Image (cartoon, coloured by chain):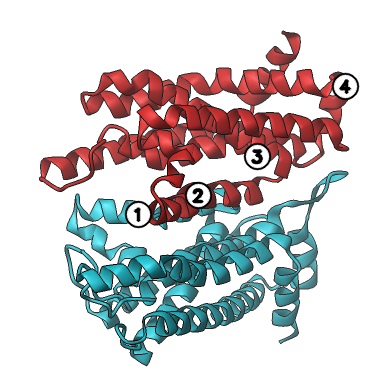
Chain colours: A red, B cyan
Amino acid sequence: MNTARAELRKLLTLPSLRLTALLTWTANLVLTYAYRAAGSRGEPLGDDAALAPLAYTQAGFLVLGVLAAASEHQEGGQIRTTLLAVPRRLPLQAAKALALAALTLPVAAATATTSTLSAGEATWTPAATAYLTLTTLLGAAVASVVRRAVPAVILLLGLYFIAGPLLRAWSATSAAYLPDTAALDPSRGAAATLVWTLTALTLAAFTVDRRDA
Amino acid sequence: MSLVRAELRKLLGLPTAWVGLVLGTLTAPVVVLLNAPYTRRAIAAGTLTDTSDLGLRDLGIGLIGPMVLGVIVVSSEYTSTGQDAPGARQLTATLAAVPDRLRLLVAKTTALVLVVAAQAVVTATATLTLTQVLHGEHAPAPAPARVAAALLYWTLTALLAYALALITRNGVVPLTLLIINSSVVSVSYLLTKVTDLAAYLPDIAGTQMFLRSGDFPVEIAPVTAGLVMTTWVVALLAVGAVLFRRRDT
Protein backbone atom coordinates (compact mmCIF):
# COMPACT_ATOMS: atom_id res chain seq x y z
CA MET A 1 0.00 0.00 0.00
CA ASN A 2 2.87 2.30 0.84
CA THR A 3 4.41 1.65 -2.56
CA ALA A 4 1.19 2.45 -4.37
CA ARG A 5 0.86 5.69 -2.40
CA ALA A 6 4.44 6.64 -3.25
CA GLU A 7 3.87 5.89 -6.94
CA LEU A 8 0.69 7.94 -6.91
CA ARG A 9 2.52 10.91 -5.42
CA LYS A 10 5.23 10.64 -8.05
CA LEU A 11 2.59 10.69 -10.77
CA LEU A 12 0.66 13.55 -9.19
CA THR A 13 3.73 15.77 -9.13
CA LEU A 14 4.60 15.30 -12.81
CA PRO A 15 3.68 18.53 -14.65
CA SER A 16 3.60 16.75 -18.02
CA LEU A 17 0.79 14.48 -16.83
CA ARG A 18 -1.30 17.41 -15.61
CA LEU A 19 -0.79 19.17 -18.93
CA THR A 20 -1.66 16.06 -20.94
CA ALA A 21 -4.84 15.47 -18.96
CA LEU A 22 -5.91 19.09 -19.34
CA LEU A 23 -5.17 19.20 -23.08
CA THR A 24 -6.95 15.90 -23.65
CA TRP A 25 -10.06 17.04 -21.85
CA THR A 26 -10.08 20.38 -23.70
CA ALA A 27 -9.53 18.69 -27.05
CA ASN A 28 -12.39 16.36 -26.28
CA LEU A 29 -14.69 19.30 -25.53
CA VAL A 30 -13.76 20.96 -28.82
CA LEU A 31 -14.24 17.75 -30.79
CA THR A 32 -17.56 17.00 -29.11
CA TYR A 33 -18.70 20.49 -30.02
CA ALA A 34 -17.49 19.97 -33.60
CA TYR A 35 -19.46 16.73 -33.89
CA ARG A 36 -22.58 18.34 -32.45
CA ALA A 37 -22.27 21.31 -34.79
CA ALA A 38 -21.68 19.10 -37.82
CA GLY A 39 -24.52 16.80 -36.75
CA SER A 40 -26.96 19.69 -36.47
CA ARG A 41 -26.01 20.77 -39.98
CA GLY A 42 -27.15 17.37 -41.15
CA GLU A 43 -23.74 15.94 -42.01
CA PRO A 44 -23.57 12.15 -41.87
CA LEU A 45 -20.96 11.27 -39.22
CA GLY A 46 -21.44 7.58 -38.61
CA ASP A 47 -23.54 5.78 -36.03
CA ASP A 48 -21.86 6.33 -32.67
CA ALA A 49 -21.70 10.10 -32.34
CA ALA A 50 -21.18 9.75 -28.59
CA LEU A 51 -18.00 7.71 -28.96
CA ALA A 52 -16.58 9.30 -32.10
CA PRO A 53 -14.69 12.13 -30.33
CA LEU A 54 -13.24 9.58 -27.90
CA ALA A 55 -11.75 7.65 -30.81
CA TYR A 56 -9.49 10.68 -31.33
CA THR A 57 -8.92 11.76 -27.75
CA GLN A 58 -7.88 8.30 -26.66
CA ALA A 59 -4.54 9.42 -28.06
CA GLY A 60 -4.25 11.70 -25.03
CA PHE A 61 -4.74 8.74 -22.72
CA LEU A 62 -2.13 6.71 -24.56
CA VAL A 63 0.30 9.62 -24.18
CA LEU A 64 -0.62 9.90 -20.50
CA GLY A 65 0.31 6.26 -19.94
CA VAL A 66 3.51 6.58 -21.95
CA LEU A 67 4.67 9.70 -20.07
CA ALA A 68 3.86 8.13 -16.70
CA ALA A 69 5.95 5.03 -17.42
CA ALA A 70 8.75 6.70 -19.39
CA SER A 71 9.30 9.36 -16.72
CA GLU A 72 11.10 6.76 -14.60
CA HIS A 73 13.67 6.28 -17.34
CA GLN A 74 14.21 9.92 -18.25
CA GLU A 75 16.85 12.34 -17.11
CA GLY A 76 18.73 11.13 -14.09
CA GLY A 77 17.39 7.60 -14.14
CA GLN A 78 14.81 7.83 -11.39
CA ILE A 79 14.24 4.10 -11.86
CA ARG A 80 17.44 3.33 -9.97
CA THR A 81 16.24 5.16 -6.88
CA THR A 82 12.86 3.51 -7.23
CA LEU A 83 14.41 0.06 -7.39
CA LEU A 84 16.67 0.86 -4.45
CA ALA A 85 13.57 1.61 -2.41
CA VAL A 86 11.44 -1.24 -3.77
CA PRO A 87 13.73 -4.02 -5.01
CA ARG A 88 10.95 -6.53 -5.65
CA ARG A 89 9.96 -5.70 -9.17
CA LEU A 90 6.67 -7.51 -9.68
CA PRO A 91 4.96 -5.88 -6.69
CA LEU A 92 6.43 -2.59 -7.89
CA GLN A 93 4.88 -3.03 -11.34
CA ALA A 94 1.54 -3.87 -9.74
CA ALA A 95 1.71 -0.78 -7.54
CA LYS A 96 2.59 1.35 -10.56
CA ALA A 97 -0.38 0.05 -12.54
CA LEU A 98 -2.67 0.58 -9.56
CA ALA A 99 -1.48 4.14 -9.00
CA LEU A 100 -1.82 5.01 -12.68
CA ALA A 101 -5.33 3.54 -12.81
CA ALA A 102 -6.33 5.54 -9.74
CA LEU A 103 -4.94 8.71 -11.31
CA THR A 104 -6.53 8.10 -14.71
CA LEU A 105 -10.00 7.10 -13.55
CA PRO A 106 -11.24 10.63 -12.72
CA VAL A 107 -9.74 12.08 -15.91
CA ALA A 108 -11.29 9.30 -17.98
CA ALA A 109 -14.64 9.74 -16.24
CA ALA A 110 -14.64 13.50 -16.86
CA THR A 111 -13.73 13.02 -20.53
CA ALA A 112 -16.24 10.23 -21.08
CA THR A 113 -19.02 12.15 -19.34
CA THR A 114 -18.64 15.35 -21.35
CA SER A 115 -18.65 13.33 -24.56
CA THR A 116 -21.51 10.90 -23.88
CA LEU A 117 -23.84 13.19 -21.92
CA SER A 118 -23.96 15.84 -24.62
CA ALA A 119 -24.91 13.13 -27.12
CA GLY A 120 -27.67 11.97 -24.79
CA GLU A 121 -26.19 8.52 -24.40
CA ALA A 122 -25.26 8.46 -20.73
CA THR A 123 -25.43 4.66 -20.65
CA TRP A 124 -22.08 4.54 -22.42
CA THR A 125 -20.30 6.57 -19.72
CA PRO A 126 -19.09 3.70 -17.48
CA ALA A 127 -17.94 1.63 -20.46
CA ALA A 128 -16.11 4.57 -22.01
CA THR A 129 -14.44 5.41 -18.67
CA ALA A 130 -13.21 1.84 -18.26
CA TYR A 131 -12.01 1.79 -21.86
CA LEU A 132 -9.99 4.98 -21.51
CA THR A 133 -8.42 3.78 -18.24
CA LEU A 134 -7.45 0.46 -19.82
CA THR A 135 -6.00 2.33 -22.81
CA THR A 136 -3.80 4.37 -20.45
CA LEU A 137 -2.54 1.20 -18.77
CA LEU A 138 -1.77 -0.30 -22.19
CA GLY A 139 0.23 2.80 -23.09
CA ALA A 140 2.16 2.57 -19.82
CA ALA A 141 2.88 -1.13 -20.35
CA VAL A 142 4.28 -0.51 -23.83
CA ALA A 143 6.35 2.46 -22.63
CA SER A 144 7.86 0.50 -19.75
CA VAL A 145 9.17 -1.99 -22.31
CA VAL A 146 10.34 0.64 -24.81
CA ARG A 147 11.56 2.96 -21.96
CA ARG A 148 11.62 6.09 -24.13
CA ALA A 149 8.66 8.38 -24.68
CA VAL A 150 9.01 9.40 -28.33
CA PRO A 151 9.48 5.90 -29.82
CA ALA A 152 6.66 4.57 -27.63
CA VAL A 153 4.34 7.34 -28.80
CA ILE A 154 5.23 6.67 -32.45
CA LEU A 155 4.59 2.96 -32.00
CA LEU A 156 1.27 3.31 -30.19
CA LEU A 157 -0.20 6.14 -32.25
CA GLY A 158 0.99 4.47 -35.44
CA LEU A 159 -0.85 1.31 -34.42
CA TYR A 160 -4.02 3.05 -33.26
CA PHE A 161 -4.36 5.71 -35.95
CA ILE A 162 -2.63 4.35 -39.03
CA ALA A 163 -2.31 0.56 -38.90
CA GLY A 164 -5.68 0.06 -37.16
CA PRO A 165 -7.85 1.96 -39.65
CA LEU A 166 -5.96 0.38 -42.55
CA LEU A 167 -6.50 -3.13 -41.21
CA ARG A 168 -10.13 -2.32 -40.60
CA ALA A 169 -10.58 -1.18 -44.18
CA TRP A 170 -8.80 -4.25 -45.44
CA SER A 171 -10.35 -6.98 -43.32
CA ALA A 172 -13.19 -6.06 -40.98
CA THR A 173 -13.28 -9.45 -39.28
CA SER A 174 -9.70 -9.68 -38.04
CA ALA A 175 -9.69 -5.98 -37.15
CA ALA A 176 -12.52 -6.64 -34.71
CA TYR A 177 -9.88 -7.92 -32.31
CA LEU A 178 -7.66 -4.84 -32.32
CA PRO A 179 -7.24 -3.07 -28.95
CA ASP A 180 -9.07 0.07 -30.03
CA THR A 181 -12.17 -1.76 -31.27
CA ALA A 182 -14.07 -0.81 -28.12
CA ALA A 183 -13.87 2.87 -29.04
CA LEU A 184 -15.91 2.12 -32.13
CA ASP A 185 -17.98 -0.90 -31.20
CA PRO A 186 -18.17 -1.18 -27.40
CA SER A 187 -20.31 -4.30 -27.12
CA ARG A 188 -17.87 -6.43 -29.06
CA GLY A 189 -14.60 -4.67 -28.27
CA ALA A 190 -14.67 -4.83 -24.46
CA ALA A 191 -13.13 -8.29 -24.28
CA ALA A 192 -10.54 -7.40 -26.93
CA THR A 193 -9.43 -4.31 -25.02
CA LEU A 194 -9.25 -6.18 -21.72
CA VAL A 195 -7.21 -9.02 -23.19
CA TRP A 196 -4.82 -6.66 -24.99
CA THR A 197 -4.22 -4.55 -21.89
CA LEU A 198 -3.71 -7.52 -19.59
CA THR A 199 -1.34 -9.14 -22.08
CA ALA A 200 0.66 -5.93 -22.42
CA LEU A 201 0.83 -5.49 -18.63
CA THR A 202 1.97 -9.09 -18.13
CA LEU A 203 4.61 -8.80 -20.84
CA ALA A 204 5.82 -5.53 -19.37
CA ALA A 205 6.02 -6.98 -15.85
CA PHE A 206 7.93 -9.99 -17.16
CA THR A 207 10.36 -7.80 -19.14
CA VAL A 208 10.98 -5.41 -16.28
CA ASP A 209 11.53 -8.35 -13.94
CA ARG A 210 14.17 -9.95 -16.16
CA ARG A 211 16.01 -6.90 -17.40
CA ASP A 212 18.70 -4.65 -15.94
CA ALA A 213 17.38 -1.28 -14.85
CA MET B 1 28.37 22.51 -46.48
CA SER B 2 30.17 20.67 -43.73
CA LEU B 3 27.39 21.81 -41.40
CA VAL B 4 24.78 20.15 -43.56
CA ARG B 5 26.90 17.02 -43.69
CA ALA B 6 27.20 17.01 -39.91
CA GLU B 7 23.44 17.43 -39.50
CA LEU B 8 22.82 14.63 -42.01
CA ARG B 9 25.09 12.30 -40.07
CA LYS B 10 23.43 13.20 -36.78
CA LEU B 11 19.98 12.59 -38.24
CA LEU B 12 20.87 9.29 -39.89
CA GLY B 13 22.59 8.14 -36.72
CA LEU B 14 19.33 8.16 -34.78
CA PRO B 15 17.53 4.82 -34.42
CA THR B 16 14.17 6.61 -34.31
CA ALA B 17 14.96 8.34 -37.60
CA TRP B 18 15.34 4.92 -39.18
CA VAL B 19 11.95 3.96 -37.81
CA GLY B 20 10.57 6.96 -39.70
CA LEU B 21 12.54 6.15 -42.84
CA VAL B 22 11.50 2.50 -42.97
CA LEU B 23 7.87 3.05 -41.92
CA GLY B 24 7.40 5.97 -44.27
CA THR B 25 8.96 4.24 -47.26
CA LEU B 26 7.24 0.87 -46.87
CA THR B 27 3.70 1.78 -45.77
CA ALA B 28 2.36 3.20 -49.02
CA PRO B 29 3.62 0.44 -51.38
CA VAL B 30 2.49 -2.27 -48.94
CA VAL B 31 -0.98 -0.73 -48.73
CA VAL B 32 -1.21 -0.61 -52.54
CA LEU B 33 -0.24 -4.28 -52.63
CA LEU B 34 -2.69 -5.33 -49.90
CA ASN B 35 -5.55 -3.32 -51.38
CA ALA B 36 -4.96 -4.59 -54.92
CA PRO B 37 -7.66 -7.33 -54.92
CA TYR B 38 -10.19 -4.96 -53.34
CA THR B 39 -9.36 -2.19 -55.81
CA ARG B 40 -9.64 -4.59 -58.76
CA ARG B 41 -13.06 -5.73 -57.61
CA ALA B 42 -14.18 -2.13 -57.10
CA ILE B 43 -13.08 -1.19 -60.62
CA ALA B 44 -14.73 -4.29 -62.11
CA ALA B 45 -17.97 -3.64 -60.21
CA GLY B 46 -17.96 -0.03 -61.34
CA THR B 47 -18.02 1.44 -57.81
CA LEU B 48 -14.62 3.05 -58.36
CA THR B 49 -14.98 5.12 -61.48
CA ASP B 50 -12.47 7.89 -60.92
CA THR B 51 -9.12 6.12 -61.01
CA SER B 52 -7.01 9.22 -61.56
CA ASP B 53 -6.07 9.38 -57.85
CA LEU B 54 -5.11 5.71 -57.63
CA GLY B 55 -1.64 5.38 -56.12
CA LEU B 56 -1.33 9.07 -55.32
CA ARG B 57 -3.97 8.78 -52.62
CA ASP B 58 -2.05 5.94 -50.95
CA LEU B 59 1.02 8.16 -50.72
CA GLY B 60 -0.71 10.09 -47.94
CA ILE B 61 -0.63 7.04 -45.67
CA GLY B 62 3.17 6.97 -45.54
CA LEU B 63 3.30 10.51 -44.17
CA ILE B 64 4.15 9.22 -40.70
CA GLY B 65 7.71 8.86 -42.05
CA PRO B 66 8.36 12.56 -42.82
CA MET B 67 6.53 13.54 -39.62
CA VAL B 68 8.81 11.41 -37.47
CA LEU B 69 11.90 12.70 -39.30
CA GLY B 70 10.85 16.33 -38.93
CA VAL B 71 10.17 16.00 -35.22
CA ILE B 72 13.15 13.87 -34.32
CA VAL B 73 15.67 16.19 -35.99
CA VAL B 74 14.78 18.76 -33.30
CA SER B 75 13.69 16.67 -30.34
CA SER B 76 16.88 14.58 -30.39
CA GLU B 77 18.82 17.75 -29.57
CA TYR B 78 16.74 18.31 -26.46
CA THR B 79 16.79 14.82 -24.94
CA SER B 80 19.30 14.19 -22.21
CA THR B 81 22.47 12.50 -23.42
CA GLY B 82 22.98 10.18 -20.49
CA GLN B 83 21.41 9.03 -17.29
CA ASP B 84 24.41 10.18 -15.31
CA ALA B 85 24.36 13.69 -16.72
CA PRO B 86 20.69 14.64 -16.81
CA GLY B 87 21.36 18.28 -17.62
CA ALA B 88 23.59 17.54 -20.61
CA ARG B 89 21.82 17.71 -23.94
CA GLN B 90 23.22 17.37 -27.42
CA LEU B 91 22.13 20.93 -28.15
CA THR B 92 24.82 22.27 -25.84
CA ALA B 93 27.53 20.59 -27.89
CA THR B 94 25.86 21.59 -31.15
CA LEU B 95 25.74 25.26 -30.16
CA ALA B 96 29.33 25.17 -28.94
CA ALA B 97 30.33 23.97 -32.42
CA VAL B 98 27.98 26.31 -34.32
CA PRO B 99 27.19 29.41 -32.23
CA ASP B 100 25.35 31.11 -35.09
CA ARG B 101 21.86 29.81 -34.48
CA LEU B 102 20.37 30.84 -37.79
CA ARG B 103 23.15 29.10 -39.74
CA LEU B 104 22.54 26.02 -37.62
CA LEU B 105 18.82 26.10 -38.44
CA VAL B 106 19.53 26.56 -42.14
CA ALA B 107 21.84 23.53 -42.08
CA LYS B 108 19.31 21.47 -40.15
CA THR B 109 16.50 22.42 -42.52
CA THR B 110 18.64 21.58 -45.55
CA ALA B 111 19.58 18.18 -44.12
CA LEU B 112 15.95 17.39 -43.34
CA VAL B 113 14.74 18.47 -46.78
CA LEU B 114 17.42 16.35 -48.47
CA VAL B 115 16.51 13.21 -46.51
CA VAL B 116 12.75 13.62 -46.82
CA ALA B 117 12.87 14.52 -50.51
CA ALA B 118 14.98 11.43 -51.20
CA GLN B 119 12.55 9.30 -49.21
CA ALA B 120 9.58 10.84 -51.04
CA VAL B 121 11.13 10.12 -54.44
CA VAL B 122 11.79 6.47 -53.52
CA THR B 123 8.32 5.98 -52.02
CA ALA B 124 6.48 7.73 -54.84
CA THR B 125 8.39 5.77 -57.48
CA ALA B 126 7.69 2.47 -55.73
CA THR B 127 4.01 3.25 -55.09
CA LEU B 128 3.21 4.60 -58.53
CA THR B 129 5.14 1.87 -60.35
CA LEU B 130 3.32 -0.75 -58.31
CA THR B 131 -0.02 0.87 -59.13
CA GLN B 132 0.86 0.84 -62.84
CA VAL B 133 1.86 -2.82 -62.70
CA LEU B 134 -1.25 -3.85 -60.78
CA HIS B 135 -3.92 -1.68 -62.41
CA GLY B 136 -2.11 -0.39 -65.48
CA GLU B 137 -5.01 -0.83 -67.90
CA HIS B 138 -7.44 1.08 -65.66
CA ALA B 139 -5.31 3.75 -64.06
CA PRO B 140 -3.65 6.33 -66.28
CA ALA B 141 -0.15 7.32 -65.18
CA PRO B 142 -0.45 10.56 -63.19
CA ALA B 143 0.86 13.73 -64.76
CA PRO B 144 4.42 14.67 -63.74
CA ALA B 145 3.12 17.90 -62.20
CA ARG B 146 0.89 15.97 -59.81
CA VAL B 147 3.73 13.66 -58.80
CA ALA B 148 5.93 16.69 -58.18
CA ALA B 149 3.14 18.21 -56.08
CA ALA B 150 2.92 15.01 -54.03
CA LEU B 151 6.69 15.12 -53.41
CA LEU B 152 6.34 18.76 -52.36
CA TYR B 153 3.54 17.77 -49.98
CA TRP B 154 5.78 15.20 -48.28
CA THR B 155 8.58 17.71 -47.86
CA LEU B 156 6.26 20.43 -46.57
CA THR B 157 4.70 18.00 -44.08
CA ALA B 158 8.15 17.18 -42.70
CA LEU B 159 8.91 20.90 -42.42
CA LEU B 160 5.59 21.48 -40.64
CA ALA B 161 6.48 18.80 -38.09
CA TYR B 162 9.93 20.32 -37.75
CA ALA B 163 8.54 23.81 -37.16
CA LEU B 164 6.10 22.54 -34.53
CA ALA B 165 8.91 20.69 -32.76
CA LEU B 166 11.05 23.85 -32.82
CA ILE B 167 8.23 25.75 -31.14
CA THR B 168 7.39 23.11 -28.52
CA ARG B 169 10.97 21.77 -28.03
CA ASN B 170 9.40 18.40 -27.42
CA GLY B 171 8.71 15.40 -29.60
CA VAL B 172 5.52 14.06 -28.10
CA VAL B 173 3.20 17.04 -28.63
CA PRO B 174 3.73 17.58 -32.39
CA LEU B 175 3.80 13.84 -33.10
CA THR B 176 0.52 13.29 -31.30
CA LEU B 177 -1.15 16.17 -33.11
CA LEU B 178 0.15 15.15 -36.52
CA ILE B 179 -0.37 11.38 -36.25
CA ILE B 180 -3.97 11.73 -35.05
CA ASN B 181 -4.57 14.11 -37.88
CA SER B 182 -3.17 11.72 -40.48
CA SER B 183 -5.74 9.13 -39.43
CA VAL B 184 -8.21 8.00 -42.07
CA VAL B 185 -10.79 10.59 -41.06
CA SER B 186 -8.63 13.48 -39.91
CA VAL B 187 -9.65 16.08 -37.37
CA SER B 188 -9.09 18.76 -40.00
CA TYR B 189 -11.53 16.99 -42.29
CA LEU B 190 -14.06 16.89 -39.46
CA LEU B 191 -13.57 20.61 -38.94
CA THR B 192 -14.38 21.28 -42.59
CA LYS B 193 -17.87 20.03 -41.71
CA VAL B 194 -18.16 22.74 -39.08
CA THR B 195 -16.64 25.71 -40.88
CA ASP B 196 -15.51 26.21 -44.46
CA LEU B 197 -12.43 28.02 -43.18
CA ALA B 198 -10.98 24.65 -42.13
CA ALA B 199 -10.39 23.94 -45.82
CA TYR B 200 -7.39 26.25 -45.51
CA LEU B 201 -5.69 24.17 -42.80
CA PRO B 202 -2.31 22.96 -44.07
CA ASP B 203 -3.15 19.28 -44.54
CA ILE B 204 -6.53 19.83 -46.21
CA ALA B 205 -5.16 22.48 -48.55
CA GLY B 206 -1.96 20.47 -49.11
CA THR B 207 -3.70 17.34 -50.41
CA GLN B 208 -5.54 19.43 -52.98
CA MET B 209 -2.20 20.10 -54.63
CA PHE B 210 -2.26 16.60 -56.11
CA LEU B 211 -5.61 14.90 -55.38
CA ARG B 212 -8.64 15.66 -57.52
CA SER B 213 -11.45 13.56 -56.09
CA GLY B 214 -11.65 14.84 -52.53
CA ASP B 215 -14.90 15.65 -50.76
CA PHE B 216 -14.08 19.15 -49.63
CA PRO B 217 -16.43 22.07 -49.08
CA VAL B 218 -14.12 24.52 -50.82
CA GLU B 219 -12.28 23.52 -53.97
CA ILE B 220 -8.86 25.13 -54.02
CA ALA B 221 -6.86 25.21 -57.24
CA PRO B 222 -3.60 23.19 -57.01
CA VAL B 223 -1.30 26.20 -57.21
CA THR B 224 -3.29 28.15 -54.62
CA ALA B 225 -3.33 25.07 -52.39
CA GLY B 226 0.45 24.86 -52.64
CA LEU B 227 0.75 28.53 -51.74
CA VAL B 228 -1.59 28.11 -48.75
CA MET B 229 0.39 25.21 -47.35
CA THR B 230 3.72 26.91 -48.02
CA THR B 231 2.49 30.01 -46.20
CA TRP B 232 1.59 27.90 -43.16
CA VAL B 233 4.98 26.21 -43.14
CA VAL B 234 6.95 29.43 -43.66
CA ALA B 235 4.98 31.23 -40.92
CA LEU B 236 5.47 28.42 -38.40
CA LEU B 237 9.15 28.08 -39.34
CA ALA B 238 9.60 31.81 -38.82
CA VAL B 239 8.05 31.60 -35.35
CA GLY B 240 10.21 28.57 -34.57
CA ALA B 241 13.36 30.33 -35.78
CA VAL B 242 12.65 33.49 -33.78
CA LEU B 243 11.99 31.45 -30.63
CA PHE B 244 15.09 29.34 -31.21
CA ARG B 245 17.23 32.47 -31.50
CA ARG B 246 15.80 34.22 -28.48
CA ARG B 247 15.34 31.34 -26.08
CA ASP B 248 17.90 29.85 -23.77
CA THR B 249 18.88 26.36 -24.76
Q: Check contact, mark 2 vs mark 4: CB within 8 A.
A: no
Q: What residue would you read off at disc 1?
A: B186
Between residues B137 and A160, which one lies in front from this camera angle? B137
- Residue A72: x, y in percent? 74, 34
Q: Chain of mark 3?
A: A
Q: Between disc 3 and disc 4, whose residue precedes?
A: 4
Image quadrant occupied by the C terminus of chain A? top right
Residue drawn at point x = 48 percent, y = 39 percent: A177
Badge 2 marks a residue whose secondary structure is: helix
The answer, for residue A203, to whether it is visible in the render is yes
Looking at the image, the residue that sits furthest to the top is A1
Residue under the point 19% across and 49% down: B194
Pointer 1 chain = B
Circles 2 and 4 on the same chain: no
Mark 2 belongs to chain: B
Name the mark nearer the viewer: 3 or 1.
3
Circle 4: element type:
loop
Task: Estimate the spatial distance between the alpha carbons at disc 1 and disc 2, rounded to whole Å.
Answer: 13 Å
On the same chain: label 3 and label 4? yes
Please name the residue that numbered disc 4 is placed on.
Answer: A87
Residue for badge 3: A142
Select label 1 or label 2 by which is in front: 1
